[in-house]
Image: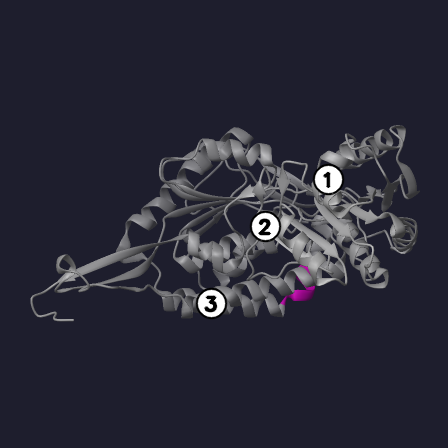
């Protein structure tokens, strides 16, 4: 069991340690020292002093060197990191391996962006008032970044937040989820081994939520990157210092439309993966599937059969496809929501029961009531709801009726249907003939309405963490 002491240079804390347990069997797997108010203040002061000392900024070449070395170290330790990520977060090993591979690619994208991203030339000399001038912009770091992360991708989410901050040249303070801090600490260790001075990335676990809120709202913080619940995210945004930017990534209740002409041999396996991947603990996990009446019986039976065949078990084993929930409380909640839906008239096609070791059987519900919790709130568990529709516009209206808007999907062989859904579904991205959880790390990734604020994705986050400073030069010698 690894014990991480405070990783804030020069700081001490009287807050003690938090014990990290594996969600599969609840055994302790590590300890992380918590930061008290004095330690949090030390981290903020260190980060702010770094930013204020322009002579001490990391050069672009140095940032590239560090990020490239970090890529190599992660690649060398990929197998170990994948197993430890699966153990800590409960995501099956086969998917945790993908997560580590994505993290390597994320750092590669950071480097590619640094090599290519540049300022611009602003046209001058086009009016009498702009004569004898040239103007251009250059990129500078916005300032201190505070990154608050979630549990469900304990390595790659940290990379998504910290990587662009360091690429932009920003000192960053990162707070991992309380249930999964170990992978964050490992990533910071790798960065330091790659040559990053410790002061530039300080991981910490505040001893209470009040300290976390104060950290985010501090006037020295220029950018807040938050991944987590909407209630917490919107509250933090309301307390940000004047001028501070933020990016908020919350949950969705992802809708899918399966049109009457859909290819079920394509749709079913994709939606099973998108709904039960990481036991449904994904912000864009497939949750509400609206199926044309002529296909609903065949589709729901096939989806249930696919769900029954999924291997549920120890996330560190190669054959496991669905692992445990992050906490026993979440199993209780999901059980209550499913039971409520069944009492309200939903038909249980498979699952609907607790399993040992903090797991819940992959569950398919047919036609839950519109006001059931599984129909209106993010389940964040292995539950997919299927609804019957007769008219496409009615299905689109049902998909859009909630205050969440993240990623959506439609399965159809008709281009007009695809384009109609792409235009009318409330979403930042509409997948055609793919599940709602599709993502590559250079594409924009944005929750709308209650689902978030700002745009994620490496290049987009890097852009938001920089300012474009303009220089205007006036000279009588400039004749252009």
State the separation of the CA atoms marked 3 and 1. Answer: 42 Å
Closer to the chain start, of discs 3 and 2, is 3
Span shown in magenta: 77-82
- Quarter of the image for the C terminus: give it: bottom left
What's the distance in space between the residues labelled 2 and 1, CA to CA? Answer: 17 Å
From the top left corner, tell me how far across and down residue 174 is, in percent. Answer: 50, 46
Callout 1: SS: helix
Helix, strand or loop under label 3: helix
Q: Which numbered disc flags the more N-terminal residue, 2 or 1?
A: 1
Residue found 82% across the figure and 30% down from its top? 336
Give the Cα separation between the discs numbered 3 and 2: 26 Å
Q: Which residue is mark 2?
A: 428
Residue, disc 1: 398
Q: Earlier in the sequence, mark 3 or mark 1?
A: 3
The residue depicted at 44 percent of the width and 31 percent of the height is 239
Q: Judging from the image, what secondary structure is the residue with disc 2 in?
A: loop
Q: Is residue 141 magenta?
A: no
In the rendered image of this protein, does residue 14 appear above or below residue 418? above
């Amino acid at each position: 069991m690894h014990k991480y002491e405070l990783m804030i240079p020069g700081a001490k804390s009287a807050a003690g340690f938090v014990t990290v347990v594996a969600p599969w069997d609840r055994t302790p797997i590590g300890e992380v020292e918590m930061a008290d108010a004095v330690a949090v203040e030390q981290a903020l002061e260190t980060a702010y002093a770094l930013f204020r000392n322009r002579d001490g900024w990391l050069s672009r070449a140095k940032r590239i060197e560090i990020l490239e070395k970090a890529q190599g170290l992660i690649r060398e330790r990929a197998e170990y990191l994948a197993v430890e990520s699966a153990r800590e977060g409960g995501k099956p090993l086969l998917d945790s391996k993908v997560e580590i591979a994505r993290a390597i690619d994320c750092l590669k994208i950071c480097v590619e962006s640094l090599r290519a991203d540049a300022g611009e030339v602003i046209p001058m000399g086009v009016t009498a008032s702009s004569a004898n001038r040239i103007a251009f912009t250059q990129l500078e770091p916005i300032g201190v970044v505070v990154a608050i992360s979630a549990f469900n991708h304990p390595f790659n989410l940290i990379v998504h937040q910290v990587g662009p901050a360091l690429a932009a040249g920003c000192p960053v303070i990162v707070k991992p989820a309380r249930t999964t801090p170990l992978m964050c600490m490992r990533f910071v260790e790798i960065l330091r081994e790659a040559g990053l001075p410790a002061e530039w990335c300080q991981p910490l676990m505040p001893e209470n939520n009040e300290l976390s809120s104060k950290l985010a709202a501090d006037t020295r913080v220029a950018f807040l990157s938050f991944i987590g619940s909407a209630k917490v995210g919107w509250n933090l945004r309301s307390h940000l210092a004047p001028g501070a930017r933020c990016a908020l990534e919350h949950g969705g209740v992802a809708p899918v439309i399966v049109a009457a002409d859909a290819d079920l041999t394509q749709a079913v396996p994709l939606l099973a993966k998108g709904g039960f991947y990481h036991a449904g603990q994904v912000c864009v996990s497939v949750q509400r599937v609206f199926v044309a009446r002529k296909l609903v019986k065949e589709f729901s039976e096939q989806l249930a059969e696919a769900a029954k065949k999924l291997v549920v078990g120890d996330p560190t084993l190669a054959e496991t496809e669905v692992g445990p929930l992050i906490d026993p409380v979440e199993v209780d909640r999901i059980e209550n929501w499913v039971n409520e839906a069944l009492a309200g008239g939903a038909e249980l096609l498979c699952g609907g029961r607790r399993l040992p070791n903090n797991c819940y059987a992959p569950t398919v519900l047919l036609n839950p009531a519109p006001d059931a919790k599984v129909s209106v709130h993010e389940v964040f568990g292995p539950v997919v709801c299927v609804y019957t529709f007769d008219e496409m516009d009615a299905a689109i209206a049902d998909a859009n009726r909630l205050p969440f808007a993240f990623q959506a999907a439609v399965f159809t062989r008709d281009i007009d249907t695809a384009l109609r859904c792409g235009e009318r579904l409330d979403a930042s991205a509409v997948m055609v003939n793919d599940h709602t959880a599709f993502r590559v790390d250079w594409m924009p990734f944005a929750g709308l309405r209650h689902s978030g604020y700002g745009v994620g994705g490496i290049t987009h986050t890097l852009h938001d963490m920089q300012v474009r400073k303009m220089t205007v030069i006036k000279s009588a010698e400039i004749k252009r």
